[in-house]
Image (cartoon, rainbow, N blue to C red):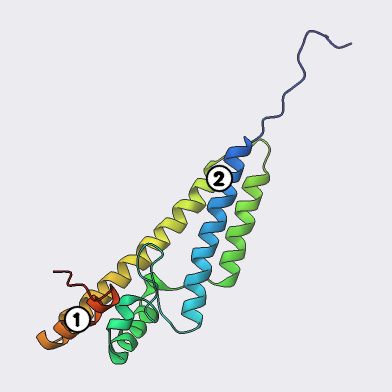
Amino acid sequence: MTDQNTPAPSRVGMRPGLRALLIGSLALNLLVVGVIGGGMIAGRGMPLPFGGPDMNIGPFAAALDGRDRDIIRDELRRRVDTQRLRRGDRAEAMNEFLAALRADPFDPAPIEQIFLDQRTQATAALTAGQEVLLDRITEMTPQGRADFAEKLGRQFGGRDHR
């Protein structure tokens, strides 16, 4: 016999807004990983910061000569901190995300860890790209740096950005 005054157990679910935010965040992260991975597969190297252009199509790359772009690309490929995720690793991360998303009761901790791992990888790639670009600029002659600055300035509409 059941007590009719006892409320039925409530299902703890995710708020629709939070679910949309998580799905949107995952989609954005996968897009970023896809752009990075696709660029590396196509031989374009690592992209520059904040979703910026990669070393073949962006203003930095357009301002560099082909030799400098090749050196930067080759150095980024050699670095462990810029190694792209293997397809199996991406699939495993997606399966972990989906399992966490479907869990009842929902626990955000596994998704937070996945996002932390993505940020760590993106930060490592960003740092490596900046370091390699700075190394290349440091090795340029004064005239080479002046030429680079001139070409880069033209990428921004020809204005003098001093």
Q: Please name whichever residue, 88 or 130, is drawn nearer the observer in this view of the structure.
A: 130
Question: On the picture, is 9 further left or further right than 129?
Answer: right
Q: Quadrant of the N terminus?
A: top right
Q: Which tag is nearer the camera, tag 2 or tag 1?
A: 1
The relative height of residue 21 versus residue 127 in the rendered view (above or below) is above
Residue 99 point in image, percent of width and height: 66, 49
Give the mark count: 2
In the rendered image, the residue lying farthest to the left is 142
Local packing at callout 2 (Cα closer than 10 Å; few below 14, some 14-19, many 20+) is few
* Residue type for callout 1: Glu
The residue pinned by badge 1 equals: 150
Question: On the picture, is 27 further left or further right than 148?
Answer: right
Q: Please name whichever residue, 113 or 23, is drawn nearer the observer in this view of the structure.
A: 23
Question: On the picture, is 124 further left or further right than 108?
Answer: left
Q: Please name whichever residue, 5 or 40, is drawn nearer the observer in this view of the structure.
A: 40
Residue 12 point in image, percent of width and height: 67, 30
In the rendered image, the residue lying farthest to the bottom is 67
Q: CA distance from mark 2 to mark 1?
A: 42 Å
The residue pinned by badge 2 equals: 21
| Secondary structure found at label 1 | helix
Q: Which mark is residue 130?
A: none
Res 140 → quadrant? bottom left
Residue drawn at x 51%, y 53% as measured from the top left: 114
